[in-house]
Structures are given as C-alpha cells and as structure tokens.
Amino acid sequence: MARYLRWQGYCVGRKRARRLMWLMGLISVAPKPNTGRKSPGHPVYLYLLRDLHVDQPNRAWCVDVTYIRLAHGFLYLTATVERYSRKALT
C-alpha cells in the first residue's frame, strides 16, 4: 500500500500506511502468520493409514482438496490418488 501511495504522489512510509489502514479498519486478504497453528477447541483426528502397508492396488486412496483464488471468486480443485501406483484417478 505504501508503494502504491508513493506511486500516486503521496509522501508516505510503510509504518504510516500501516497505521492509517489500521485506523480505517482495512486489512489485507493475504494469509496471516501462524495460520498453521491448531485451534484449542478443534478435534484432532487420527491418521489411520500410518502403519498400513499398501502392497496391492485398490487398497487405499488419498484425496486432496484445495482452492485457487480467481478474480471473481474461488475455484475448488480436488485430486484422488491411488496409493499403490501413485496415479491420479479420473
């Protein structure tokens, strides 16, 4: 924000821009620090496949869900992977 304001012709530093944003109640949409910390009230689920030896196909699969930020919203992307061959299923 400070760079943008300087580009617009205002004489402002990083700290002043931060203070003014705080006064106006503006916050960044970028991820904040410590986003990987556990919430005290959230349950912890056991990883049941930790000691499972996958020695044949179609015994275990992994699923990952993530999102991609777009200009008009989010796009959710899911991937299913077979653990034995490590190939993505379609």
Image (spheres, grey):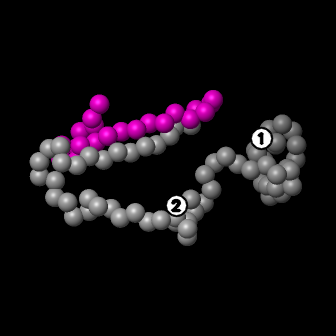
Vertical placement of 49 versus 5: above or below?
below
What residue sits right under mark 2 in the picture? Answer: 36
Reading the chain from its start, which is encountered first: label 1 or label 2?
Answer: 1
Residue at image coords 86%, 50%: 24
Give the dominant element type of the magenta stretch: helix, strand or loop. strand
Residue 6: image location, x then y, percent = 82, 43
Checking the image for residue 4, the label placed there is 1
- Location of the N terminus by quadrant is top right
The boundaries of the magenta stretch are 70-90
User: Mark 2: which secondary structure?
Assistant: loop
Residue 63: image location, x then y, percent = 35, 45
Residue 48: image location, x then y, percent = 29, 61
Marks 1 and 2 close (CB-CB < 8 Å): no
- Location of the C terminus by quadrant is top left
Checking the image for residue 28, the label placed there is none
Residue at image coords 62%, 30%: 71
Tell me if 17 is positioned left or right of 54 in this view.
Answer: right
Question: Which of the 4 quarters of the picture holds residue 23?
Answer: bottom right
Question: Does any portion of residue 80 appear in the rendered image?
Answer: yes
Residue at image coords 52%, 64%: 42
User: Mark 1: which secondary structure?
Assistant: helix
Q: CA distance from mark 1 to mark 2?
A: 30 Å
Compare residues 30 and 45 and report the one nearer the observer. 45
Tell me if 61 is positioned left or right of 46 in this view.
Answer: left
Q: Amino acid at mark 2?
A: Gly
- Please count the marks in the image: 2
Residue most toward the left?
A: 56
